[in-house]
Amino acid sequence: MVNTARFVILVLAYRFLVPFLSVSAEPGQARESYVVYMGSPSSGGNPEAVRASHLEMLSSIVPSEEQGTVALKQSFHHAFEGFTAELTEKEAAVISGSVLAVSAAESFPGSGRPASADVIIAVIDTGVWPESPSFDDAGMGPVPARWRGVCMEGPDFNKSNCNKKLIGARYYSVMPDSSPSNSATAFAHDASFAAVALTGSPRDTVGHGTHTASTAGGAVVADADYYGLARGAAKGGAAGARVAAYRACSLGGCASSSVLKAVDDAVGDSADVVSVSVGIGSAFQSDFLADPIALAAFHAHQKGVLVVCSGGNDGPRPYTVVNTAPWVLTVAASSVDRSFQSTIALGNGAVLKGVGINFSNQSLSGGKYTLVFGPQAAAPYAPVAEASNCYPGSLDAQKVAGKIVVCVATDATVSRRVKKLVAEGMGARGLLLIDDADKDVPLVSGGFAFSQVGVDAGAQILDYINSTKNPTAVILPTQDVKDFKPAPVVASFSARGPGLTESILKPDLMAPGVSILAATIPSEDASEVPQGKTPSRFAIKSGTSMACPHVAGAAAFVKSAHPGWTPSMVRSALMTTATTTNNLGRPITTSATGAPATAHDMGAGEVSPLRALSPGLVFDATTHDYLVFLCLYGYKEQVVRKVAGDAGFSCPNKAAAGAAAAQDLIAAELNYPSISVPKLGRGKTATVARTAMNVGPSNATYVAHVEAPSEMTVTVAPDRLVFSKRWTTARYEVRFSVAAGGAAKGYMHGAITWSDGAHSVRTPFAVNVV
């Protein structure tokens, strides 16, 4: 994911109900950016009138002698209303008493038939490299007449850089090249970005945004490759769709105000789907109405626009998934059926298969290099543990130069890339890393020889080093292995559920996010370009950042076939048709343990765009449903009214039932395409209701099939749904129970599948036995 600017403090209150009081700034009190969130926009609000009201609000709280120095930086008025301005902490406190929310702008961290060319995908990221062949508009018709966006210019970006494929480009205030640890970031795994000067331009200077944009809606590019690897046709998930790039992020992250403004603009520009490979780290999650992505996505949903987000890269630990608002489509990452092997030939004749992407010039006929284990090359006074991990400063350059260094990974604070830089910087000829973690995600090391092996192969290497006075080896250049099995596998880094509320099952589904070939910016780093080659127009990247645009493209694909479907219907179609078996015909597993994946790992399963075109049944959820969710989650009625933009909205009486009961009600009543029961006592029963809508043929009868653990009883009533016509609905209930003392504590997983013989509509469930 990518980082955002300092996020805002959300303080809830009414708007325009009390007078604004001017506040004298205390001497030396610094001003900083604050986002003022005011809920849904006034109907029919004129943009200039809205901006004028924002200026009036500012003038009411800023001393007259300082009003000339206070700027209204941004004004939001499409999907929601608010603005960004420079305020002191005291001024922000005063204005927070008169609006729905005020927050200091914080930063947060960070793949068939073509879709209709009338579908528009907005990509909020680090910008775009328009010269990439992925944005060639050959054969595309005129830009849709409903498009209201612009192609902003900058010193290195002209209006002519936009075309009938890349139809729009905007840029916003971006973070500096460094950002706080709790900033929002793009979710690219083990990423390495070249530091470059930032300009006021939509142009991508990082590569992340170009990669995600081309993954979502890039044109078909024949014979694409990364220096000979992964050769084939590169195309976006919706290759015929239009793409608009919104540069709200930089190397340092994404300003929350910029993300809010970008989503607001994307909605106003008439985008159909918004792809956001951005989010805050799992340790810094905030409530839904204190999260700029969740806020912006809610209002986008109000306007009929689906927002797709990365789930984060903090896996495989549980409770790490982010961007978990129920109106957001949250994506996990999986592997593809391709592997990148870097073979290791030891001096004793043993040949080991490692993982990595390197373009070294080592060969079997070119002579071998001395192998040295980190502790054997330790710098004076360096602890053995640090030298074993190739910790910066722990190795002696004279003992390393010209050799292949062997490192372990018992210290998680030293990443693979850091180890590689340490060895390379000391003149080593290569690095062998012994580590089972992240072995499913090959490190791209450029011309420096690198390979990673697991602990079993690592033991063979260390035994060999200890068995001879002159251990040697070579690390051969990478080869790609096609039709790799098993695939897909849940990526080790992919964040896991449960999410912020255990009443909603997250992530929603999974898509390719490991070793994804897509467009990039030309690299200026000589170490990344093999000798004698020109910079590649494509790159191989991994992360939930790469998975997210796959699903955004799939959503655009479905939207092109069903333009009248709501965001929730599109999300439902993608989830209920997802696949749960791999290319061996067995259940999808996790790379971390090899065990069968659960819904907390992969959501509903691996996205299957073609199947999603004809889901049979869908589970729709309206804005009203999500407002009730906010009530049940614990927000006060006046706050929810302000978010809704509806003074007449009332929370249901059951919202006052207490936290535990309210969470049960969320699970029971929100019409979600999956089920999560946060607490089920032994000997107790939990009942969940869902309403299915028939989007298939008339006179359809669906029969329920239950997959459940043997210790759990699951009944569906009725177990047959009959639809006389298309667009009609049917309600059913699912009852979960476990016998007293009959099951261990913890989550149990299964699924309910409705079938009419032609369609299979699968809804996974997770039930927490307490």
Image (cartoon, rainbow, N blue to C red):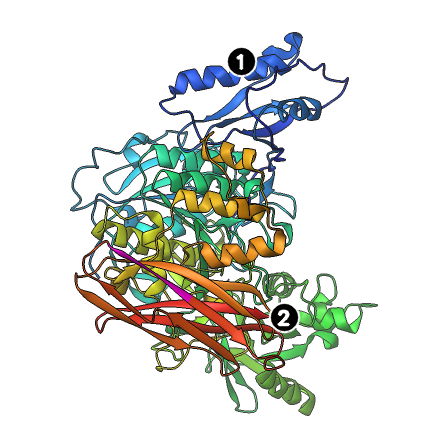
Q: Amino acid at mark 2?
A: Val
Left/right of residue 554 with respect to residue 70 in the rendered view: left
Residue at 63%, 79% (x, y): give it: 371
Residue at numbered disc 1: 56
Using the image, determine if residue 356 lies above or below residue 254: below
The boundaries of the magenta stretch are 728-733
Left/right of residue 176 with respect to residue 133 in the rendered view: right
- Whole-angstrom CA distance, mark 1 to mark 2, is 54 Å
* Extreme residue toward the top, this view: 65
Marker disc for residue 770: 2
Q: Position of residue 282 (x, y in %)?
A: 60, 55
Left/right of residue 539 with respect to residue 504 in the rendered view: left
* Extreme residue toward the right, this view: 381
Q: Position of residue 522 (x, y in %)?
A: 40, 49
Mark 1 residue crowding within 10 angstroms, few (<14) / some (14–19) / many (20+): few
Q: Position of residue 287 (x, y in %)?
A: 59, 46
SS under mark 1:
helix
Residue at 61%, 14% (x, y): give it: 19
SS under mark 2:
loop
Using the image, determine if residue 101 lies above or below residue 21: below
Tell which circle, 1 or 2, labels the residue nearer the N-terminal end. 1
Using the image, determine if residue 412 lies above or below residue 29: below
